[in-house]
Each structure stands twice: as C-alpha cells, then as structure tokens.
Image: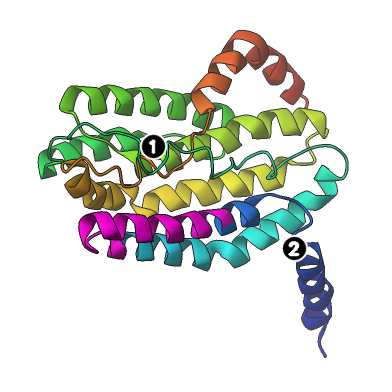
Amino acid sequence: MNILTLIKIPLITSVLLLTGCIDGFEKHLQDAISLYGERKDQYSEQTNGATDVLFERLILTETLLLPVAKTYDARAYPFTEQGIAIIQNDFVAMDDNRGFDYPLPPAAELTAELEQQAQDIIQSLFTIDGQDAFAVSDTVNSVLRSIAAFEHRHNVYLPMSKHLIESLGYGALHSLYYRCDSDNKTYRLGQDLMALQLLAIKIGNPLDYDRAANIFHQQRVGVLLNDLPHIPFLQEYDQYIMNDKDRLQHCLQAF
C-alpha cells in the first residue's frame, strides 16, 4: 500500500462519517430532488407529461452533485463546530418557494435575440476576478438588477439563471464574514464554493432551463418560477453596503 493510498483512506472515511452532520449542501440537494419529484408529477398532470423531461434533467443533475456536496459539508464541519456556519448557511430551504399553484400571468416568448441579450448580461460575471469575493458580490448585485429590469421590460422570466446567480452571490458575500470570524481560516473553502458556483453558471448554462420553461410560462404554467426557493441575496447585499463593507474590508486587509 503506497503513501497516497494511506492518505486517501482516512480522508474518504472522514467524509463518509461526517456526511449528514450538518444541514448544508447535501441536505439542500436532497430536498431539491424530493421537491422536483413531487412537482414533476403535479406539472405532468397539468401539461400531459410535457414537463417531465425538464424535471428529470433537474433531478439527474442534483443527484450527480451529491458526492461533491458531501465533501463540502465535511470540510465545513470543523467550522460549524466553532459556530461558523459556512456551507450550512449558504443554502436556503427548498420549501421557501412560491408554490405549485401560485398564479402566473402569461409570459412573452423568450426569442433567440432576447436569450442572447440575457446571456450578455450574465457574461459580465466572467469578466471579473472570480477569486475576489468583494468583486463577485458587487457584480452579482448588478447582474441580478439588470436581469430584473430585463424580465420586466420583455415580460419573460429567467428563474434558473437568477437562482444560480443569487446562490453565487449569497455564498460569496457570506464568505467575507466567515473569513473575519475565523481569522481567515475559512478562506479556501469559501473560494472553492465560489469557484464551483461560477463553474455551474458557466458550463451548466441555466438559460437552457429558462428557455425550456418559457414554453410553459407562455401557457401560465409556473415551471421553475414557482419551484425554486427565494434566496435573499439582494436584501443582505443592501445591508452589507450600508453597515458592513468598510468593516469587512478593514478586517481582511490583514490577510
């Protein structure tokens, strides 16, 4: 048995033992899989099965992420034991969604031209330093406000794009507080979560989901829009700007 194997065994064991010790990333995915399964059946009745493929894709994606989520939860565990809720507080409860029956006015078509305009807005996330949580938080705020204006102007919805971008900003913003509270010990984990979420937006192309959902939005069926949970990034960002940004910048100058 070589040295690498000896190192891997306790690492893998610790991940398995710590799985489920915190309600974090893995719990969020498990709850999402459960909710999507329920909504798949509900929407299937409403659309004669037309929404099944979309929800099957969602469930598969979340299932494939479970092993990754377990490692993040395991890495977060020592910090949560010290009262620093990194990862644990970076994912919101899935039941904080609008509900299957929430009324939806008919949307307009998300044309190829509009989709390109939306992609141009999202693309600004990849023109900044993705390792700078201050810059990521600021850019997410700007992008989300641009998307909201875009949706209002064109009467379309981009729920999956907004969800992933909100999640990115939520974790990035929180990471600044965790770093100060931990004397920068949470830095690497916060950076890795931010990188993972940026990658999910870049290669996952959430606009694909929004395009698929738009067909149903035009029929007043709230696929994704009524299913994804509210992430209070914008509210927390406003509080951060008013109360905490200067303090956090001063705190983190030492690192």
Residue 181 higher or lower than 74, as above or below: above
Residue 82 place in picture, x, y as percent: 88, 40
Circle on res. 162: 1
Left or right relative to 215: residue 198 = right
Of the 4 image quadrants, the one containing the N terminus is bottom right
Quarter-of-image position of residue 244: top right
> In front: 126, or 231?
231
Left or right relative to 253: residue 150 = left
Q: Which residue does the numbered mark 2 point to in the structure image?
A: 19
- Amino acid of disc 1: Lys
Decide if residue 129 is in sight here. no
Residue 202 higher or lower than 163, as above or below: below
- What residue is at 60 percent from the left and 47 percent from the top? 193
Residue range of the region highlighted in magenta in the rendering: 31-53
| Residue placed furthest toward the bottom | 1
Mark 1 secondary-structure assignment: helix
